[in-house]
Amino acid sequence: MTECNWRARSSTNFTVRKLEAEKQEGSPLQLQSETEDLEAPWEAATVQGTIFPAPNFNPVMDAQMLAGALQGFDCDKDVLIDILTQRSNAQRQMIAEAYQGTYGRNLIGDLKEQLSSHFKEVMVGLMYPPPSYDAHELWHAMKGAGTDENCLIDILASRTNGEILQMREAYYLQYSTNLQEDIYSDTSGHFRDTLMNLVQGSRQEGYGDPAMAAQDAMVLWEACQQKTGEHKTMLQMILCNKSAQQLWLVYVSSELPSWDFGFHNKTVIRILIARSELDLLTIRKRYKERYGKSLFHDIKNFASGHYKKALLALCAGDMEDY
Ligand SMILES: [Ca+2]
């Protein structure tokens, strides 16, 4: 049976410094035992991801397969999907190192060059360590005119305090600018107050009660819809006092109905990539409970081609029940 991969995310294996070509000596098995202590049994019982470290992992062999797929006359996208969606993020980092070591080329660069559109977004997104991916998403949510408010709330409300501190560091390293300052200048009013609170990374932690989350979801949804400021106190109380995991349930429950009115590709990609090792299985269950159709079913209907295939692989499951 699969088990919760919470510990993988709680660990510091994903620090942005991994980007700085730090040599990775350990095997995935060592990575797990090293962080064993961080796993709390009640978390394992509550949340479950869909992607796990591949057994018998060989980064050099994966790098060779990817090179073959990327450098051929016609890029073999199935190989990219089979490898990149079936490895943990930590393993993908090792593949990128092996790729660089063997071919002297940057894997993200080659993926960007060879791929296009949403499929490219998924494959490239999978290659970022989580804090860098968050930083990347936040940057794009704010750059230029306007703000992708959903993206800001999604990321800041669903990450743990430790993850927020790491994303701030990654943001600064990648963009040479301060995340708090960017949020402050790109937003306004109560929404800004809330985000500024969240980005402090000093909230209570721990997984919430799902029934409470459903109730909060309604309040939050109303608050977001009306935008009159009437619910601002409630909204701020929820966002700033509840734990990240509780917030995530609130967010998932309140935000996903909008998919009924159109498939918001950026949101779908971001959630599937960021949550696949953490709680995507739990999200799938709640999605099905709440909206009647499975996430798998909706992706199948809305997406197409290799993009669809990659999303379904991350979603990992075609069961009718969820
Ligand atoms: Ca902006």
Image (spheres, rainbow, N blue to C red):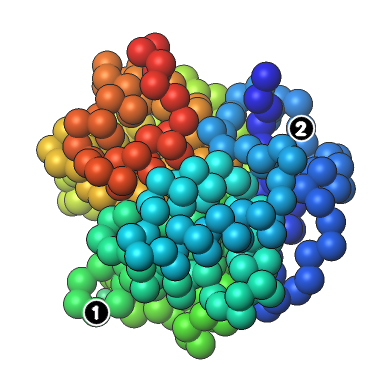
| Residue 268 picture location, percent across and down | 33, 45
Residue type pointed to by label 2: Ala
| Residue 16 picture location, percent across and down | 64, 70
Give the quadrant of the N terminus. top right
In the image, which disc is placed on residue 144?
A: 1
| Residue lying furthest top | 321
**Marks 2 and 1 in Cβ contact (< 8 Å):** no
The answer for how far apart the CA atoms under marks 2 and 1 are is 42 Å
Residue 55 makes an appearance in the image:
yes
| Residue lying furthest left | 261
| Residue 62 picture location, percent across and down | 61, 54
Give the residue drawn at x 41%, y 16%: 319
Tell whether circle 1 marks a residue whose Cβ is less than 8 angstroms from ligand 1: yes
Report which quarter residue 117 is drawn in.
bottom left
What residue does disc 2 label? 40
Badge 2 or badge 1: first in the primary sequence = 2
Give the residue drawn at x 44%, y 25%: 317
